[in-house]
Image (tube, rainbow, N blue to C red):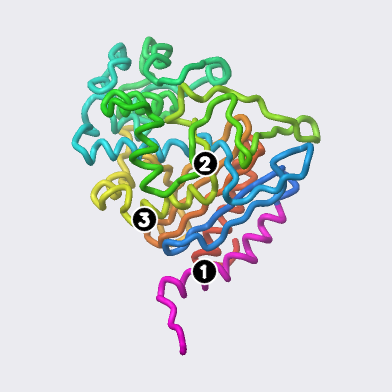
Amino acid sequence: MRVTLPLVAVMVAAGAQAVHPRVDAGIRRIQPQVPGMSIAIAIGGRIAYAKGVGTTSLATPTPPTADTQFRVASVSKPITAVAIFKLVEERSVDLDRAARDYCPALAPLNGAPTVRHFLLHQSGMRHTTDEEDESVAGARAGPALARVTKEPLRFVPGRRTLYTSWGYAALGCVIEEVSGQSYAEFVTDRVLSPAGMTRTTFDRPDYTAPDFSPGFRMKGRAFAPSLVVDTRFKRPASGIISTANDLTRFAMALFERRLLPEPLWREMLAAHPADDDERPVFTAGWMTAPTTLGTPVFSYNGSMEGTTAVLALLPERQIAVALLANRERFVPGVTPLVREALRAALGLPAE
């Protein structure tokens, strides 16, 4: 009996065949510069490529897989943005209402940035400093915000764009105050579980697990353990731990509208330029830039102590690439591999 595969299965199989040799070659080029790395690629609703290379330990060879956990740094921000949109879907939050109406800790601000302003990095609130990243502790966003809400905003909300992890900590406060749950509880219930992200959790300084990779930094010409920082005060900005496979599941859940209905998904991707900016850099949860791929790209990268992370989506083609590495602050080093993976998945020639 002849078995006819569904069209989507044929497309995924063909896409995977094209992707494997090109991504394998790209991995070989950068592998000497990274102790360990995982990459997963979703095409047409299925994970078409998943691989780990290198090691998660400098003492004993411990190969990672696409299910190895890494800190994802700022790739936490799109997950937080989806959580905000879940509250919008419930009509508990209005994107164009002042965020301080939902988070009392924001009351001292000398302005009224809206929830949307925070999503777009247009609030005027500054980014966290290296000193704060290394010294601020505590598990809830609201009390931690007292440090920054005493300062004047850098500009009138909506006037400019200024990347800010404090701004996403403020969104975490909105989530907690409106939902009555901790950030971790709400995100688990409303985002991670529906997306099937069973290997995704929340960072703490003493976190450990059998399949978790600690991070490393270059010290001279050798790798050394990274400084471990407490990200709990800014979990909504950079405090999530995940896997390459789980991040592609997140993307697929968005593509299939299992997390957000069509109108809110389109609103999340919509550009809202700041008054003084020539073009938008951020949508409500994603980074956007001109592309030569022939289809829009929405992405986020993360770079901090112990990790490098990239998640790139091609929504119109239902393609996603997730890359996690245990070398800190190495986004420029892995970006060519992500770009090549996208081009391979689209069937485009190498650059």
SS class, disc 3: helix
Residue nearest the observer in this picture, 89 or 67:
67
Quarter-wise, where is residue 116 in the image? top left
**Residue that badge 2 annotates:** 242
State the residue at coordinates (28%, 50%): 266
- Secondary structure under tag 2 reads strand
Q: Is residue 17 magenta?
A: yes
Q: Amino acid at mark 1?
A: Gly
Left or right: 55, with 289 as reference point: right
- Residue at image position (40%, 29%) is 168
Cα distance between the residues tagged 2 and 1: 25 Å
Query: Can you give x and y, in whole percent of width and height, for residue 202 in the image?
Result: 49, 32
Q: Nearer the viewer, mark 2 or mark 3?
A: 2
Measured from the top left, where is residue 70 in percent x and y? 58, 39
> How many other residues sit within 10 Å of disc 1, few (<14), some (14-19) or many (≥20)?
many
Q: Looking at the image, is 75 positioned above or below residue 323?
A: above
Distance Cα–Cα, label 1 vs label 3:
17 Å
Q: Name the residue beneath numbered marker 3.
A: 255
Using the image, determine if residue 224 lies above or below residue 12: above
Badge 2 or badge 1: first in the primary sequence: 1
Magenta stretch contains residue 151: no
Direction from residue 57 to residue 112 in the image, left or right: left
Category of crowding for the residue at label 2, using alpha-carbon neighbours closer than 10 angstroms: few (below 14), some (14–19), many (at least 20):
many
Of all residues shown, which one is farthest toward the bottom? Answer: 1
Q: Which residues are magenta?
A: 1-29
Disc 1, disc 3: CB below 8 Å?
no
Check disc 1 and report the residue beneath it: 15
Callout 2 amino acid: Ser
Q: Is residue 278 visible?
A: no
Q: Amino acid at mark 3?
A: Phe
Residue in the picture at 56% in, 15% down = 135
- Left or right: 82, with 132 as reference point: left
